[in-house]
Every structure is written in structure tokens, then in C-alpha cells.
Image (spheres, rainbow, N blue to C red):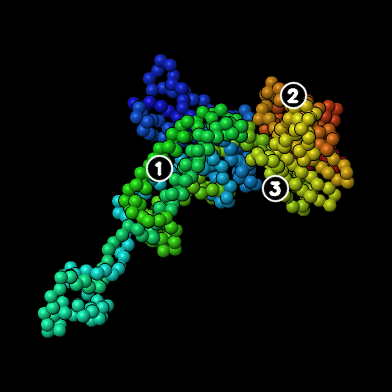
């Protein structure tokens, strides 16, 4: 009988009055999620992958997947996020993150444990040759060095009766003879011990981050479901750490003197299928990076509203490139947060920059890269700035994953707030726009005449959006 059901490590609530029945409703995300069923002994009964589609009134599934592919091609970190939904990612680059590391440990950790147990049942052993001093009757073989060594010893010659005289001695005569033995302290096992310790360190680091850093993670990852998943994730890591420590205490690794990666060890690992499989799974469990075209892992991505926000950022980047063709893009981060990206086009006419989640400090905190707020600290979704010959201009965009009249009008509050409170180099924004995934139920707010009269408005990012974005940037920034 099932005792608990978890979706992406978040326990579901049982339905009152029903047996073996749990309720679940997807949040604001789209992609693949994993549902796991556990029995009363906390043993995994089974797991299933559930495909969650985007809200049909906002985006079709094909359109959403095209957004994800477009973002991934531009910069994979714009897709990676903290929602339960997963999407294929590559494994190139060096970037890492606690939840990226956990996702790979969850996907490969226990498989690595089973592979290590398999190789431990038939471990590679190395034949070691050495010389030892032993009585003649215990010697298993003699060689030239044994004979030469005995020839230099009068006692040995006498003991062999080669002098014709019977020499009696109270001491037993020892001969230098060759011997050999098999040991599990081999290059292959040293290499696998190094891999095992690397995985164990990774598990320990991620678990410590989850246990001791929940406050910091809550500040960085506001997703409530993510916070609810931490207890189950910590339990999984504790179980994985216990399994790995158990392997360390058993043969062959309890007989390996040191962890060492060598060319000899790597060749031996590659030549043995069991060792090769374990090494591959261990590397998959700890490797960093999410770049590359090949789909390597199913990793967490952002919620649908975040994917749309970052896709809107990319549309502004493309519009800027079309407006100022032939200029190289410079992509960097602005501030300590992972989501504060900036793309710059530096031209002979001026500098155009597109900012994702820039920080506008409060009125009494000084500015940040020329940004400040006349009231409280603000983080608008998107800002496009233009600097040329002492002239600064900027436009604010707020990406809203909404199309209904109520949702859009409610979201317009941010456009009015940003237009009134934000400053760049002491200048007010010329306009503040909402970006929506489709035409809304408020057509008047999408008209150019309304933009010119009120300084705010709504821009649907449909197929006709690019020419309009280019013209808006030209009129309100470069003109």
C-alpha cells in the first residue's frame, strides 16, 4: 500500500475520506515532472514522468517549446530555473548551482551506487612481484638472483652441502627468492576511489547547502514548492551519502591505500565494462554545465512566466540587433543575482544596453550603474538604455504572462509605478510597457496613439511584434 506521493520531491496532500488518493495541481510551469510513490517503509514503489502543458489561453504547447528552444540556443542559463518542470539541457561549460547539482545527483546517484556494488563483486586485482627472504623448504621458485645471492653466502653454500663438510648451525638459513601476490590496491581501484570520493564530496556539499542555507536559498529562490521540497531532498542526499560511505568501508576500497587518477588506471577502467559504467555514472552525477546542443539531462527550468519574461528579453535583444546591425553583442551579469543579465551593443553612435532584472536602489541608497528609484527599491523585468554624447534615455518593459482583461489591467499598475519612480542617470523613462504573450482583451491600450498620449501601454509579443519593437526603440531611444 502506498504511504506517500511526491511530485518533484514535494509531498502531496491525501484526499480526506479516500484511500490511496492524493490531489495535485500544476503551478505556473510547463515541462516534465516526476511523480514518486513510496510505501510505509519509505521505499520507492514506482516513479512516473508527467508532461505538463502551458495554459492554452496564453500559449500553445508548440509556441512555448519554441520559446524554450530559442532561449536555450541563445543562453541556456536563461532557461534553467527552480520550478518542478524539467527540460533537456546540455552538459558543457563550468557553471553550477545547488539545484543543478542536486538534479544530477538525483538522476544518477543511486545508479552509481548500484554500479559500484556490481564492480565490487568482481574487483580488478593487480599481480605484485617482490622478493623475500625465506627458508629453502618454503620457497616456491628460484631464479638466477637466488643462485647468485646464495653463491656469495658461505652459510648458504654450507647449508646446501656443496662444500663437502656438514656444517651445523643454530640459525635457519634464509634465501632471497621471488614471490608474487594479488592485491586490490590497483590503479583501476585507485581511480574509482577518487571518483567515489568526488561524488561523496558533492553529496555532502549540496546537503550542507540545503540544511544550513535554507534562509539564503529562500531569498534567492522564492518558489514555495521549491522550499517545500527541501526536506525530501535532504533525506535523499542523506540516504545517498550513507550508501556511498558503506561502499567505502567494503572491499575493494577498504584495501586501497590512496585515491589516484592515473593514465594506467583510466585505461584499466575503460577496458572493464563494469568499471566503465560506474565511472560514467559517477561523472554524470557530478559534472557541471548546462550548455551544448546535445540533450544530456532533464533539469529544472523556470516557471512559464519566467520563461516568457526571459524570452521577452531575447526579443528586445533581437530588435536591438536589427536596429543596430553589424555590432557585436556583449553578454554579462549585473550584480550578484543569477538573473541580472545585461546585453550591450556598443556602436560609434552610442551604447544600447538591454537589462534583465536590473536593480534600482531606494532613494537613500545611492545609484547602481546609474539606476535609482525615487521611493522603494525596484526590480523591473526589462530596461533598455541608450547613451550618446551626454544624452541618456531609457524605456521600461514589464513582462506579464497574462491575457485576460482583469489580469492585464492589474498588471498595468507596475507600468505606472515604474514610469513615475524609476530614474536612469537622473532621467525619467520615456515610456513603460507591458509585454504579453498574446493580444489581450484591452485593445485600446495596445494602440500607438495611446502610447504617445499616456506614455504607457501593452505590446503583445505575437508574430508582428518584432517590427513594432524595432520602431518603438528607434522612436523613443535613438530619435
Q: Locate residue 313, reporting x and y percent.
A: 70, 39
Q: Which residue is mark 2?
A: 413
Q: Position of residue 330 (x, y in %)?
A: 72, 49
Residue 303 lies, in percent from the top left, at: 59, 33
Q: Residue at x 41, y 27 (%)?
A: 4
Point out the image quarter for the C terminus: top right
- Rounded to the nearest whole Å, what is the CA distance between mark 1 and mark 3? 38 Å
The reply to whether residue 151 is in sight is: yes
Image point 78% across, 35% down: which residue?
Answer: 366
Q: Nearer the viewer, residue 346 or 439?
A: 346
Q: Which residue is mark 1?
A: 110
What is the crowding at mark 1: few (fewer than 14 residues within 10 Å), some, or many (at least 20)?
some
Residue at 69 percent across and 21 percent down: it is 406
* Residue topped by disc 3: 331
Q: Earlier in the sequence, mark 2 or mark 1?
A: 1
In-image side of 76 versus 265 (left or right): right
Relative to residue 24, is residue 428 drawn left or right?
right
Q: Nearer the viewer, mark 2 or mark 1?
A: 1
Labels 1 & 3 near each other (Cβ < 8 A): no
Q: Residue at x 36, y 33 (%)?
A: 43
For residue 238, above or below residue 14: below
Earlier in the chain: of badge 3 and badge 2, it is: 3
Residue 189, which numbered label?
none
Labels 2 & 1 near each other (Cβ < 8 A): no
Crowd class of label 2 (few under 14; some 14 to 19; many from 20; radius 10 Å): few
Amino acid at each position: 500500500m502506498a504511504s506517500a506521493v511526491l511530485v518533484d520531491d514535494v509531498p502531496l496532500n491525501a484526499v480526506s475520506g479516500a484511500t490511496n488518493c492524493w490531489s495535485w495541481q500544476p503551478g505556473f510551469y510547463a515541462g516534465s515532472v516526476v511523480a514518486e510513490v513510496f510505501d510505509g517503509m519509505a521505499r520507492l514503489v514506482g516513479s512516473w514522468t508527467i508532461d505538463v502543458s502551458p495554459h492554452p489561453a496564453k500559449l500553445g504547447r508548440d509556441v512555448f517549446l519554441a520559446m524554450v528552444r530559442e532561449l536555450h540556443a541563445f543562453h541556456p542559463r536563461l532557461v534553467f530555473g527552480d520550478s518542478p518542470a524539467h527540460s533537456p539541457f546540455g552538459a558543457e561549460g563550468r557553471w553550477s548551482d545547488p539545484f543543478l547539482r542536486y538534479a544530477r545527483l538525483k538522476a544518477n546517484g543511486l545508479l552509481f551506487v548500484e554500479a559500484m556494488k556490481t564492480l565490487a563483486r568482481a574487483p580488478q586485482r593487480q599481480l605484485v612481484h617482490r622478493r623475500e627472504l625465506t627458508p629453502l623448504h618454503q620457497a616456491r621458485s628460484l631464479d638466477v638472483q637466488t643462485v647468485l645471492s646464495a653463491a656469495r653466502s658461505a652459510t648458504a653454500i654450507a647449508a646446501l652441502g656443496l662444500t663437502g663438510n656438514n656444517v651445523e648451525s643454530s640459525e635457519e638459513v634464509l634465501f632471497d627468492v621471488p614471490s608474487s601476490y594479488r592485491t586490490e590496491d590497483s590503479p583501476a581501484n585507485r581511480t574509482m576511489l577518487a571518483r567515489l570520493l568526488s561524488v561523496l564530496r558533492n553529496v555532502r556539499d549540496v546537503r550542507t547547502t540545503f540544511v544550513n542555507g535554507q534562509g539564503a536559498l529562500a531569498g534567492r529562490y522564492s518558489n514555495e514548492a521549491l522550499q517545500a521540497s527541501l526536506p525530501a531532498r535532504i533525506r535523499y542526499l542523506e540516504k545517498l551519502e550513507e550508501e556511498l560511505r558503506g561502499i567505502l568501508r567494503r572491499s575493494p576500497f577498504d584495501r586501497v591505500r590512496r585515491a589516484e587518477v592515473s593514465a594506467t588506471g583510466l585505461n584499466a577502467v575503460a577496458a572493464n565494462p563494469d568499471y566503465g559504467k560506474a565511472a560514467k555514472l559517477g561523472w554524470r552525477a557530478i559534472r557541471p554545465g548546462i550548455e551544448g546542443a546535445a540533450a544530456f539531462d532533464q533539469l529544472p527550468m523556470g516557471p512559464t512566466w519566467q520563461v516568457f519574461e526571459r524570452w521577452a528579453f531575447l526579443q528586445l535583444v533581437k530588435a536591438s540587433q536589427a536596429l543596430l546591425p553589424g555590432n557585436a553583442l556583449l553578454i554579462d551579469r549585473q550584480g550578484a543575482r543569477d538573473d541580472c543579465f545585461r546585453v550591450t551593443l556598443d556602436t560609434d553612435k552610442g551604447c544600447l544596453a538591454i537589462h534583465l532584472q536590473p536593480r534600482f536602489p531606494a532613494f537613500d541608497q545611492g545609484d547602481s550603474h546609474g539606476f535609482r528609484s525615487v521611493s522603494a527599491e525596484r526590480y523591473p523585468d526589462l530596461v533598455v538604455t541608450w547613451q550618446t554624447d551626454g544624452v541618456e534615455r531609457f524605456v521600461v518593459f514589464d513582462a506579464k504572462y497574462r491575457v485576460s482583461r482583469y489580469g492585464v489591467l492589474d498588471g498595468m499598475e507596475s507600468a505606472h509605478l515604474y514610469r513615475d519612480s524609476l530614474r536612469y542617470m537622473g532621467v525619467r523613462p520615456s515610456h513603460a510597457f507591458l509585454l504579453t504573450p498574446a493580444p489581450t482583451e484591452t485593445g485600446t491600450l495596445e494602440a500607438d496613439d495611446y502610447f504617445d498620449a499616456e506614455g504607457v501601454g501593452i505590446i503583445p509579443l505575437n508574430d508582428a511584434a518584432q517590427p513594432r519593437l524595432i520602431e518603438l526603440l528607434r522612436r523613443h531611444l535613438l530619435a
